[in-house]
Image: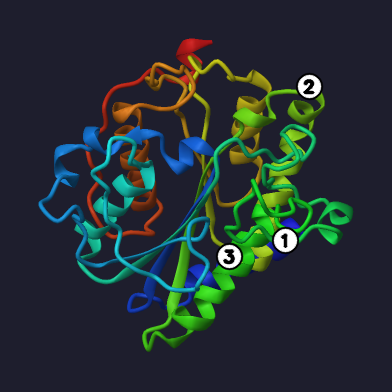
Amino acid sequence: MSRRILLILFAFVLATPGIAQKSVFIYAGQSNADGREVTANLPDYLKVANHSPYRYLQYADIVKQSDGTFGQRVFGTRKNDRYAFCDVTNYWIEQALQTEFYAVKCAYGGTALDPTARPQKVPTWCIDDEWLAIHNAYAGQNIETDSFKMNNSLAKGLVERFHLLEKTTLSKLKEGYHVKAIMWMQGESDSKPKTAEKQYYERLKKLINYFRANIAPCHFILATMPHKSRQYSLVIEDAHFRLAHELPYVHLIDMSGSTLLSDQLHIDARGTDYLGKAMYNKLVELHLVKGNPVNLPEFSTASELR
């Protein structure tokens, strides 16, 4: 899709009256988008008696469910139950909107844009034409037992499952709906081999355009990798900054100074809180959510750390 056509589409979407439309937000990426902090460390504002602090949120995690329905987001209480930055962002969206809205999550740990960067049984975000032609959508099957050749395109999976949600629910909303943004955190798995790292810019650029062509011409918000990550890559970080600078309606959340869990790979409770709030603040800044920004923990920026 050319830059001129994309700008025209955005101008139409952003100019179309949509105050009464239901808002839709999409979250995607690998493990830091899926969430690796345990629910025992939830921020106080997410801790409630029935394990769901949401009244208006309609939630679908399409990696874990594929029936085309939205439901309630409930936090588990088992030792290894986890939460993600989307849970924080959704909380603050709800506080601002005070009306029904929809969130779609598609995140899978260890996934890369380059299919050669990960084991063959791990789904991938690759959308190369030849590769997509012989691989079906990943739709939540057990990849340990199901044929990976039949079920390993997360990009296809997100598009197909979104359209199923659209068919079963979103298209039936009397107010209509508006996909406001896709929020993305991914890149660690493309840091090796070097061929994957070097191709990351072009692959992510193509993926952004793929989502915009097949889901909606929406805003795309990128989160960078923390510098303390053992999989940190300057090449991939530069790709994130470059895409935010060059592509229309692509924005950046600088996570370079984030604190991490003991594995030195996944953002901890403080980092999850920061990213979730920073995503919400970006939505407010872009007038995608009518609300007030919230205070953030202090982290160093990429320019300060380099």
**Residue 289 is drawn in which quadrant?**
bottom left
- 286 or 166, nearer to the observer: 166
Are circles 2 and 3 on residues that touch, CB within 8 Å? no
Circle 2 crowding by C-alpha within 10 Å: few under 14, some 14–19, many from 20: few
Relative placement, left or right, of 221 versus 240 is left
Q: Which residue is mark 2?
A: 194
The answer to whether residue 203 shows anywhere in this view is yes
**Residue 193 is drawn in which quadrant?**
top right
Residue 135 at x, y percent in the picture: 80, 57
Relative placement, left or right, of 38 versus 123 is left
Mark 2 to mark 3 CA distance (whole Å):
35 Å
Q: Which mark is residue 131?
A: none
Q: Residue at x 86, y 61 (%)?
A: 133
Q: Which residue is mark 1?
A: 4
Placement of 55 over or under 242, stated as above or below: below
Q: Earlier along the polypeptide chain: callout 1 or callout 2?
A: 1
Q: Which residue is mark 3?
A: 10
